[in-house]
Amino acid sequence: MSISRDEFNPLAAVVDWLDACRRGDLNALLDLYDERAVMECGCEGVTLTGRHSIAAYWAPKLESKRVPAFKLDDVVLTGHGVRIDYQSYEGKPVRFYFRFDSSNKIIYTSCGPLIGRAAKISPN
């Protein structure tokens, strides 16, 4: 059963993303992304395009995650998607932005370290 765009809940999609990360389930994580998704990582200074590149980025991180990895600290709907503040796979504070395409898949993400209450990144 497919979900129409009107029924799509981006907050639920982000919770699914966090749950997949917590479980270390790379396949479930990748299922949330569009084939052409772009990820800009300000933490490591890289830009990745496509599921294959995103898989190569996330696989070692999911395997080496620490407690309290992927703990949600804050979530906000933005004009373009969702912004979350969470604990990274290393347990460090990160701000992550998500944008979704018309098929309800993640098409773009950007992340960066969260310093105090302000992040070093902003969505494009």
Image: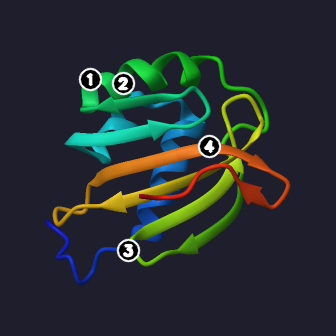
- Amino acid type at circle 2 is Ala
Q: Amino acid at mark 3?
A: Asn
The Cα–Cα distance between marks 2 and 4, rounded to whole angstroms, is 18 Å
Name the residue rendered at 17%, 76% in the picture.
Answer: 4
How many angstroms separate mark 2 from mark 3 (CA)?
Answer: 24 Å
Please identify, in this view, whether the residue under mark 2 or under mark 3 is nearer the observer. Answer: 2
Measuring 77% from the left and 35% from the top, which residue is drawn there? Answer: 91
Which of the numbered marks, if any, corresponds to residue 17?
A: none
Q: In this picture, is 44 found above or below 9?
A: above
Q: CA distance from mark 1 to mark 2?
A: 5 Å
Which tag is nearer the camera, tag 2 or tag 4?
4
Image quarter (top left, top right, bottom left or bottom right) of the C terminus: bottom left
Find disc 2 in the rendering and name its residue.
Answer: 55
Query: Considering the numbered disc 1 on the image, is that residue within a helix, a strand or a loop?
Result: helix
Residue 20 position within the rendered picture, expressed as x and y whole percent measured from the top left = 48, 41
Q: Amino acid at mark 4?
A: Gly
Going by the image, does 98 lie left or right of 7? right
Q: Earlier in the sequence, mark 1 or mark 3?
A: 3
Q: Residues within 10 Å of mark 1 (few under 14, many from 20)?
A: few
Mark 1 and 2 residues: CB-CB less than 8 Å, in contact? yes
Q: Nearer the viewer, residue 91 or 114?
A: 114
Q: Which residue is mark 3?
A: 9
Q: Residue at x 47, y 26 (%)?
A: 58
Distance between mark 1 and mark 3 Cα atoms: 26 Å
Q: Secondary structure at mark 3?
A: loop
In the picture shown, does residue 96 fall above or below 90?
Answer: below
Relative to 46, is 2 on the left or the right? left
According to the picture, the residue beneath numbered tag 4 turns out to be: 112
Residue at numbered disc 1: 52
